[in-house]
Image (cartoon, rainbow, N blue to C red):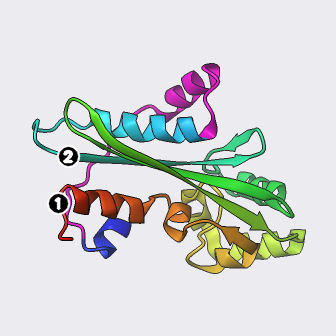
């Protein structure tokens, strides 16, 4: 949706990678959250079978709170637990994007947004989850910033598109440099 809204024409497919396996292996290797996000984006781009001249965009996002990494909540109870853990604290959304030919990664970028969550009362969390419903399960942070999720934050340091999961502005610049988009 982000690329489409920016006027970039593309074909989309599900890469079908085993993200849990990549996360386990990366953590066993001592990878940082930034390295993990980039490994996930490269794995997704690499899984797509294309013609040699095609350029594949791979992207992914990781949420880190201190040393703890979060996945999308499995259910509303886990979403509640996520929001409780974030309350009054700052977590990072790390978004990575890469461009890959059939043979090589030709460009990559990682961006970090610091998400400063205000103190959240249990009543607020309950009301928020009730109002938003299972849509929150589609987001690693159990919030959708482009909607009512904005009410969770006192400040955000970072790029809006990084929060959405795709460092769009650096990607658009690279596509212009490559002549894929008009300069």
Q: Position of residue 109 (x, y in %)?
A: 44, 48
Q: Residues within 10 Å of mark 2 (few under 14, many from 20)?
A: some
Highlighted range, magenta: 8-33
Where residue 180 is drawn, which disc sits there? 1
Q: Position of residue 86 (x, y in %)?
A: 79, 58
Q: Secondary structure at mark 1?
A: loop
Of 147 and 168, nearer the camera is: 168
The answer to whether mark 2 and mark 1 are in CB contact below 8 A is: yes
Q: Quadrant of residue 44?
A: top left
Of 6 and 145, nearer the camera is: 6
Nearest-to-viewer mark from 2 and 1: 1
In the rendered image, the quadrant that contains the N terminus is bottom left
* Magenta stretch holds residue 138: no
Q: Quadrant of residue 151?
A: bottom right
Of 87 and 142, nearer the camera is: 87
List the residue tagged with mark 2: 55
Is residue 1 visible to the viewer in this orientation of the structure?
A: no
Q: Quadrant of residue 28?
A: top right
Q: Position of residue 62 (x, y in %)?
A: 58, 47
Relative placement, left or right, of 126 versus 178 is right
- Mark 2 and mark 1: span between their CA atoms? 10 Å
């Amino acid at each position: 949706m982000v690329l489409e809204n920016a006027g970039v024409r593309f074909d989309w497919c599900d890469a079908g990678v085993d993200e849990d396996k990549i996360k386990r292996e990366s953590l066993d290797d001592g990878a940082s959250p930034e390295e993990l996000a980039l490994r996930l984006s490269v794995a997704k781009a690499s899984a797509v079978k294309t013609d040699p001249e095609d350029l594949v965009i791979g992207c992914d996002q990781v949420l880190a709170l201190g040393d703890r990494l979060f996945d999308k909540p499995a259910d509303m109870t886990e979403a509640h637990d996520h929001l409780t853990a974030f309350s009054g604290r700052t977590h990072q959304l790390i978004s990575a994007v890469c461009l890959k030919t059939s043979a090589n990664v030709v460009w990559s970028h990682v961006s970090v947004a610091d998400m400063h969550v205000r103190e959240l009362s249990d009543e607020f969390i309950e009301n928020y989850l009730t109002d938003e419903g299972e849509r929150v399960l589609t987001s690693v942070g159990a919030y959708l910033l482009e909607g009512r999720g904005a009410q969770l934050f006192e400040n955000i340091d970072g790029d809006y598109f990084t929060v959405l999961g795709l460092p769009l502005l650096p990607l658009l610049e690279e596509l212009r440099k490559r002549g894929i988009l008009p300069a």
